[in-house]
Amino acid sequence: MATLHIEHSIVDFPLWRPAFGRFAEARRRAGVRAHHVSRPAGDPHYVVVDLEFGSVPEAEAFRTFLAHEVWSTREKSPALAGSPRTLILEPADEDH
């Protein structure tokens, strides 16, 4: 299990949400098992997305896809403001 954690500033959530939705099929093909979209309380111009994958390589491959095919063009990411920050997370062993 791995999570691709993405954070970035946006210019407008109602503009961002449909753009995110247009990539639902790409997420499915890439192996996304679930996704969660959040925004910090009091900050309507920031979004946090967690995409759950079965493996780290799947998460890495999708991060590369996003960087090269989505975030690089204004047409595909019209509400993006600045550069996204990403982390690939793995479950932590709670016994240590």
Image: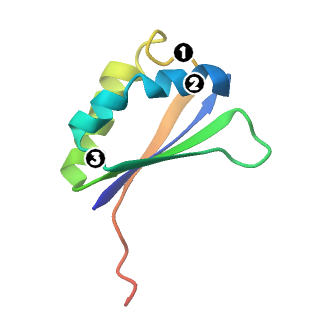
Q: CA distance from mark 1 to mark 3?
A: 23 Å
Q: Are marks 1 and 2 in contact (CB under 8 Å)?
A: yes
Residue 76, image x, y percentages: 43, 15
Residue at 53 percent across and 22 percent down: it is: 18
Q: Which residue is mark 2?
A: 16
Name the secondary structure under disc 1. loop
Residue at 65 percent across and 23 percent down: it is: 14
Q: Is residue 1 above or below residue 23?
A: below
Residue 34, image x, y percentages: 38, 50
Nearest-to-viewer mark from 2 and 3: 2
Say what amino acid the circle numbered 1 marks. Pro
Tell me if mark 1 has few (under 14), some (14-19) or many (20+) residues whose alpha carbon lies within 10 angstroms of its own.
some
Residue 11 in which image quadrant: top right
State the quadrant of the N terminus.
bottom left
Taking the image as shown, residue 77 lies to the left or right of residue 90, namely: right
Q: Which residue is mark 1?
A: 78
Q: Are marks 1 and 3 in contact (CB under 8 Å)?
A: no
Q: Which residue is mark 3?
A: 59
State the quadrant of the C terminus.
bottom left
Q: Is residue 77 above or below residue 20?
A: above
